[in-house]
Image (cartoon, rainbow, N blue to C red):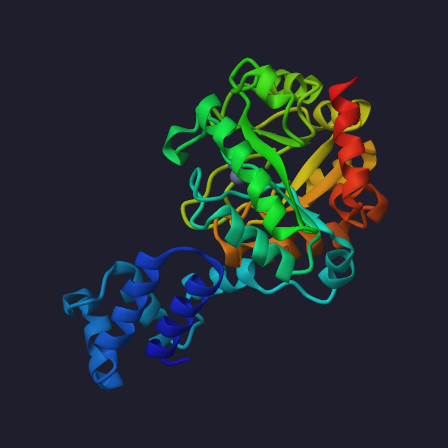
Amino acid sequence: MEPGEALERIADLLQRVRNQRPKVLAFRRAAEAIRDIPLVELRALADAGRLTDLPGIGSSSATVITEALAGKTPTYLENLTVDTEPPTDLAAPVRTMLRGDLHLHSDWSDGGASIEAMARTASELGHEYLALTDHSPLVRVANGLDARRLEQQLETLAAVNQELAPFRVLAGMEVDIRDDGSLDMDDALLSRLDVVVASVHSKLDMEPAAMTRRMVAALTSPHVDILGHCTGRLVVGKGRPESRFDAEDVFAAAAHHDKAIEVNSRPERLDPPRRLLRIVDDSGAKISIDSDAHATWQLDWQSYGCHRVAEIGVPVARIVNSWPVDELLAWTASHASA
Ligand SMILES: [Zn+2]
Ligand SMILES: [Zn+2]
């Protein structure tokens, strides 16, 4: 592969699957910068370690160019292709069973689109419902909603639902699980929500025993329906290691309380990893395959999660967002009254 082609491919993949505009632009600039430079000349610069002398060529681009000149598939491109490989046919049968998406964000917290835009796209993707799950206040960087703003959002939802019926926008929140396992929102407000996803966003590296207690406590709360991205890992770029906890205990608690473990479909998360998803499957806990979308185009990411679920062979009946909305709401209501 020619160096310029490699840089363009990387920019395309970054643009299609990730929301990393600055990097997309940097790789496009690099491709542009070397377009008119003959290969011999590029090779001489690479051999001298002087590619970064060229305007628009940073160290990542220089490595890509050097590897491409050596006849190798650049590592950057290879990594990107591995984790952004579009889901195969395996995903499709599971994806077609899904009727909704239970974890996504709007511009009320750190999402990029309005509630209505997210709902319209979800509807175009064939969904009958979604749960709007903006962040709670503890996630300050994400402009989490405090009680007052959540109240306002609930009022807004009534209007959106009237407009989009029969499509349903369910009231929800991705509530933060505090260090001690308590939830970052008033009980009174949580009890008014249709769907609550509880997630860990801080101290992801706490001791396994404490993390286990933290997650089990959240799953025991009558407000919580789904445990979000349980390991917190990030598998691209710099990455982030998995939180450590007793997976058997946590998933058994989910099964005991009839809750769901989320399969987070974001390509940089794909959480839980296969190894843990097998334990979820064995535990009998429900699962929810969610996009965790922060933009309309990311709603389509559910296929990545569907692929994982198909690989492990989790029975479709245990996927809560494959259920009709009334069944789903009866399930979440059963937690509140437990
Ligand atoms: Zn989250
Ligand atoms: Zn989220």
Which residue lies at the image location 70% right of the left edge and 29% below the top edge?
225
Q: Pinpoint residue 186: horizontal percent, then vertical percent.
A: 55, 16
Q: Pinpoint residue 43: horizontal percent, then vertical percent.
A: 25, 78
Which residue lies at the image location 78% right of the left edge and 55% below the top edge?
97
Query: Dividing the picture into quarters, in which one does residue 278 lie?
Result: top right
Quarter of the figure that contains the C terminus: top right
Up the image or down, 17 lies above or below 136; here it is below
Query: Dividing the picture into quarters, in which one does residue 36 lie?
Result: bottom left
Which residue lies at the image location 73% right of the left edge and 22% below the top edge?
249
Query: Dividing the picture into quarters, in which one does residue 127 lie?
Result: bottom right
Q: Pinpoint residue 258: horizontal percent, then vertical percent.
A: 80, 27
Quarter of the figure that contains the N terminus: bottom left
**Which sits in the foreground, 310 or 150?**
150
Up the image or down, 323 lies above or below 310; here it is above
Up the image or down, 21 lies above or below 186; here it is below
**Which sits in the foreground, 302 or 179?**
302
Which residue lies at the image location 72% right of the left edge and 60% below the top edge?
91
Q: Is residue 267 visible?
A: no
- Please indicate whether residue 257 sits to the left or right of residue 114 in the image: right
**Which sits in the foreground, 275 or 331?**
331
Q: Pinpoint residue 326: horizontal percent, then vertical percent.
A: 80, 40
- Please indicate whether residue 220 sits to the left or right of residue 108 in the image: right
